[in-house]
Amino acid sequence: GAGVSQSPSNKVTEKGKDVELRCDPISGHTALYWYRQSLGQGLEFLIYFQGNSAPDKSGLPSDRFSAERTGGSVSTLTIQRTQQEDSAVYLCASSQGLAGALLLSSGANVLTFGAGSRLTVL
Amino acid sequence: GENVEQHPSTLSVQEGDSAVIKCTYSDSASNYFPWYKQELGKRPQLIIDIRSNVGEKKDQRIAVTLNKTAKHFSLHITETQPEDSAVYFCAASLRGSQGNLIFGKGTKLSVKP
């Protein structure tokens, strides 16, 4: 697609419920990232994918959080047994190549963000 | 753990003045340093980036400088305009995991007309 698409744009759920957030990256982008942004706060790194592989899952806040990516494209972030502190905007981004990789192509490292999924846990 | 410190958290300047935002990083092997601008209610967007083999990069009113020895980099905005008002985030890639891009906590810049 033309940009990074995220769904749902807004999700209100009750504490204890599971939620799934979806990210559809720019076509051809091999790298995909998930960040969390609490109200008025910075961008907290959660996880990234190179293709379908997630080399570093250390940013996930707890074992209630998981993510997967299939076909080198769409990714889902799943939060089980949601808690009120999970309330935030979850941002997805994609790039042609990995952010820190030595790439010859200008702009290949640049992350393009989606509009985010705002999660509210009551 | 590895992190990126950003200062100041808020910055208010008069239109036409310059603004400087500074960041420090802990991973000496970090090699990529982008800056993102996030306007209220919108997604972050890249404004400028620099690699570790370059000391300075400029794009019109925006410039970034990098001091690898001191492990800090700065964003300079000259001739500020009201539309520069936004939250600015610095970021650094981490060693050993080329995909990890860690962001600072952001600087809210207000440009007063």
Image (cartoon, coloured by chain):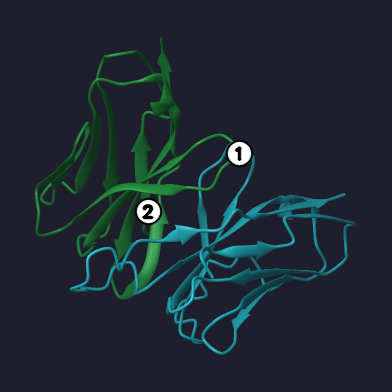
The residue indicated by pointer 1 is B41
Kindly identify the residue that appears in the image at 74 percent across and 61 percent down: A8
Q: Colour of chain B?
A: green
Mark number for residue B3? 2
Q: Amino acid at mark 1?
A: Gly
Residue A79 vs residue A62: left or right? right
In the rendered image of this protein, does residue B19 appear above or below residue A71?
above
Q: CA distance from mark 1 to mark 2?
A: 25 Å
Colour-to-chain, cyan = A
Q: Position of residue A120 (x, y in %)?
A: 79, 50
- Name which residue lies at 27% across and 54% down: B33
Q: Quadrant of the C terminus of chain B?
A: top left
Q: Residues within 10 Å of mark 1 (few under 14, many from 20)?
A: few
Viewer-nearest residue: A15 or A95: A95
Rendered view: A87 above or below A67: above
Left or right relative to A32: residue A104: left
- Evaluate whether residue B18 shows in this view: yes
Q: Is residue B9 above or below residue A86?
A: above
Which of the 4 image quarters holds residue A46? bottom right
User: Going 48% across and 72% down the picture, which residue do you hit?
Assistant: A32
Q: Which chain contains the residue that carries disc 2?
A: B
Pointer 1 chain = B
Tag 2's secondary structure? loop
Residue B52 locus on image (x, y percent): 15, 58
Q: Are marks 1 and 2 in contact (CB under 8 Å)?
A: no
Q: Quadrant of the N terminus of chain B?
A: bottom left
Discs 1/2, front: 1
> Upstream in the sequence, badge 1 or badge 2?
2
- Can you see residue B1? no
Residue B19, percent from left and from top: 28, 24
